[in-house]
Image (spheres, grey):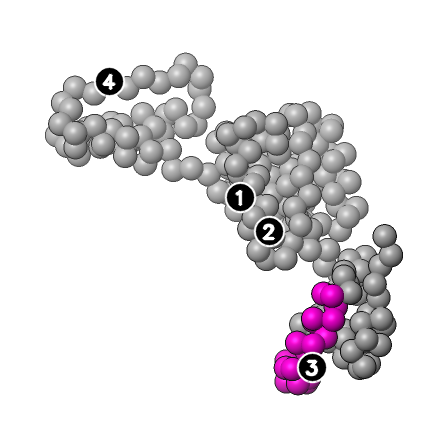
Amino acid sequence: IRMVTMKEVAQEAGVSIATVSRVLNGKDRGRIKPEIAQEIKRIAEDLGYQPNLVARNLKTRSSRILGFVSDEIATTPFAGRIMLGAQDAARELGYILLTVNTGNDADLERRQIGVVKQYGADGFLYAMMYHRVVEIPDELEGSPTVVVDSEDENRKIPSIYPDDEMAGYDATNRLIQAGCKRIVYYGSSITIIAQGERFAGYRRALADAG
């Protein structure tokens, strides 16, 4: 596939390469007439122009790439929606999500983070399949990072995870509002954070309802 250059777009539009560059990089406001900018964009689209990401990265020092590092999310049907949500948000903001699945292998995780860094990732999402306290890999030090569906054990990195206490509260409250008086809580024997928080929400809802 042959790449269309800015020079070709400029020749077709009858303007300078600098003008095309300003328009296609969103720096034309107040400098180039809107109708000319519109025509340049139309011509670029018709010719199938695609920006040279490598050249742009070198110039702006921004790859527009986010690394999505997960333990098993990519291979798990339900948790996979987390990855799809991240992908949609990234796309809306002009970013590409580069996903690696570690399978809970610490050595593989280190190597994969290194590979994503070689692509010049602007930031990372460190995502777990279920809510737990995690140790952030040293390899992510210095990179903007958000922990997804878990908590950073050192409380230094922003973490996003479900409000499981409220989930237990809401579920119990639904039954109370339906007229139930004797509500049983069945919990898993697996000791995960969500289990204790859901049970606490159940107890709080019962207490609030007397």
Say if 106 sits above or below 5 in the image: above
Does label 3 or label 4 sit earlier along the sequence? Answer: 3
Marks 3 and 2, how far apart at CA: 30 Å
Residue 184 got which mark?
Answer: 4
In front of the other: label 4 or label 1?
1
Please identify the residue farthest to the front as the structure is shown: 46
> Would residue 61 be counted in the magenta stretch?
no
Residue 62: % across, % down: 72, 59
Q: Amino acid at mark 1?
A: Gly
- Residue labelled with disc 1: 85
Q: Earlier in the sequence, mark 3 or mark 2?
A: 3
Of discs 3 and 2, which sits in the foreground? 3
The reply to whether residue 64 is visible in this rendering is: yes
Q: CB of mark 2 within 8 Å of CB of mark 1? A: no
Q: Nearer the viewer, residue 56 or 118?
A: 56
Q: Tell me the element at label 4.
A: loop
Q: Which residue type carries mark 3?
A: Ile
* Amino acid at dot 2: Ala
Q: Is residue 40 above or below residue 141?
A: below
* Residue 33 drawn in magenta: yes
Q: Residues within 10 Å of mark 2 (few under 14, many from 20)?
A: some
Measure the C-alpha gap from mark 3 to mark 4.
Answer: 69 Å
Q: Amino acid at mark 4?
A: Val
Q: Residue at x 70, y 71 (%)?
A: 41
The residue where tag 2 is placed is 90
In the rendered image, which quarter is residue 37 located in? bottom right
**What are the residue bounds of the magenta stretch?**
28-46
